[in-house]
Amino acid sequence: KRPKTHPDVNSEQLVAALEEGYQAITTLEAAGERIPNAEFKARLERITALAQRILAHIESDPRQLRRARKFLNVYLDGVRQVAAGYARSHGKDESGELEENFRHALVSIEQVFGEQYQKLQESNLMDLDVQIEVLRNQLEREGVL
């Protein structure tokens, strides 16, 4: 299915960005399958469902391409990296610190994905840009990005 076109948007770039997003979701789902913790699995399922809704919204409104790139580069790629790293390492940390950090990151990401989707629905684009920067800074402070 091809996304809608818009005269101000390069459709090839939009298709490439959306394909990248859906591939990141597939990778995230695969990482979730390797994580035995039921709470984390449920959080990752909710995050991927929100990510799919966000990508579908961007697909239906091609003017959101700039935002799609930010979403892909900051949020979706960040959560994909975090989940893949946790899936590889979860059995190696006996202190529980990794689990607690992962839980905290998932809670933050799930909340922000929900807020982002809501802001896309409301077309509150300035708030969305600010929220992207806040999460980027938070994930960098926590060593996720």
Image (cartoon, rainbow, N blue to C red):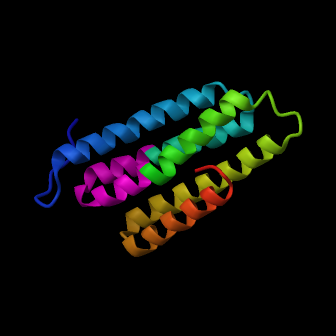
Q: Quadrant of residue 39?
A: top right
Q: Nearer the viewer, residue 145 or 108?
A: 145
The answer to whether residue 41 shows anywhere in this view is no
Q: Residue 3: x, y in percent?
A: 22, 44
Q: Residue 57: x, y in percent?
A: 34, 53
Q: Residue at x 75, y 48 (%)?
A: 101
Q: Nearer the viewer, residue 141 or 134?
A: 141
Q: Residue at x 39, y 69 (%)?
A: 122
* Picture layout, residue 104 above or below residue 49: below
In the rendered image, residue 17 lying in the magenta stretch gets the answer no
The chief SS type of the magenta part is helix
Q: Nearer the viewer, residue 69 or 36?
A: 69
Q: Residue 107: x, y in percent?
A: 67, 53
* Picture layout, residue 49 above or below residue 35: below
Q: Quadrant of residue 80?
A: top right
Q: Is 137 placed left or right of 38 in the picture?
A: left
Quarter of the figure that contains the N terminus: top left
Q: Nearer the viewer, residue 37 or 135?
A: 135
The answer to whether residue 44 shows anywhere in this view is yes
Q: Quadrant of residue 6?
A: bottom left
Q: Residue 27: x, y in percent?
A: 50, 31
Q: Is 33 placed left or right of 62 in the picture?
A: right
Q: Magenta residues? A: 52-72
Q: Residue at x 20, y 39 (%)?
A: 2
